Image (tube, helix red, strand yellow):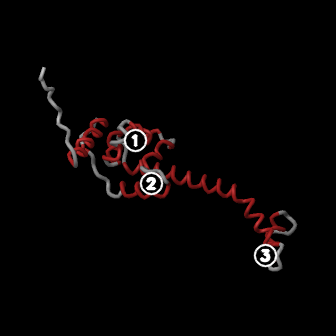
């Protein structure tokens, strides 16, 4: 029983990455040669990811209401998580039949919406401290401006 089972060669290095990249394309059902590259899309997505904390920014597509762009997200999540970063965002758009600029627009809308909501939440949380600080300054000898602000805010003085 000295029979040896044949070993499947496992490549390493760049060959392994290329192999995994091809697996990602296979999961999308597309040929990498067919995917057009759209200038600056990947760079803009990287920038949005850094600013929003969503890395990769394609994760923001989960929150879009746009049914066309949701196809891009469906293509994105159809690829194994560990392989997703190995192919360009245009590949997901190509697989979904969506223009990359349309996808970028949808991501931008979601990012702006989230930023606005975050700002509102932070302002709501901090407003009691701001009012308390304004009152503290208004009660000081040099707080004339703050006193006017507070008196206008509560309606004791007319608006300017």
Q: Residues within 10 Å of mark 2 (few under 14, many from 20)?
A: some
Residue plotted at (36% across, 39% down): 96
Q: Is residue 4 left or right of residue 63?
A: left
Please identify the quarter of the rendering in which residue 39 is found.
bottom left
Residue underneath mark 2: 49
Give the camera-side residue of 42 and 52: 52
Residue underneath mark 1: 72
Q: Residues within 10 Å of mark 1 (few under 14, many from 20)?
A: many
Alpha carbon distance from label 2 to label 1? 17 Å
Q: Are marks 2 and 3 in contact (CB under 8 Å)?
A: no
Please identify the quarter of the rendering in which residue 136 is found.
bottom right
Q: Earlier in the sequence, mark 2 or mark 1?
A: 2
The quarter of the image holding the C terminus is bottom right
Give the camera-side residue of 10 and 155: 10
Q: Residues within 10 Å of mark 3 (few under 14, many from 20)?
A: few
Alpha carbon distance from label 3 to label 1? 53 Å
Please identify the quarter of the rendering in which residue 148 is found.
bottom right
Residue plotted at (78% across, 73% down): 137
- Which secondary structure, mark 2? helix
Nearer the observer: mark 2 or 1; the answer is 2
The quarter of the image holding the N terminus is top left
Q: Is residue 60 left or right of residue 130?
A: left
Q: Earlier in the sequence, mark 2 or mark 3?
A: 2
Where residue 41 sits: x, y (%)?
A: 36, 55
- Which secondary structure, mark 1? helix
Residue underneath mark 3: 145
Residue plotted at (60% across, 54% down): 118
Give the camera-side residue of 80 and 5: 5
Q: Is residue 151 left or right of residue 66?
A: right
Most extreme residue toward the left is 2
């Amino acid at each position: 029983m000295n029979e040896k089972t044949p070993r499947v060669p496992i490549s390493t290095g760049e060959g392994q990455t290329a192999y995994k990249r091809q697996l990602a394309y296979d999961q999308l059902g597309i040929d990498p040669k067919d995917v057009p590259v759209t200038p600056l899309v990947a760079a803009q997505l990287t920038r949005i990811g850094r600013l929003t904390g969503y890395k990769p920014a394609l994760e923001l597509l989960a929150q879009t209401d746009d049914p066309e762009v949701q196809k891009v997200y469906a293509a994105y999540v159809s690829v194994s998580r560990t392989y997703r970063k190995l192919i360009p965002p245009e590949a997901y758009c190509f697989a979904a039949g969506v223009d990359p600029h349309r996808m970028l627009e949808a991501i931008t809308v979601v990012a702006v919406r989230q930023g606005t909501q975050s700002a509102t939440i932070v302002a709501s949380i901090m407003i009691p401290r701001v009012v308390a600080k304004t009152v503290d300054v208004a009660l000081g000898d040099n707080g004339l401006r703050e006193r006017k602000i507070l008196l206008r805010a509560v309606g004791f003085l007319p608006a300017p």
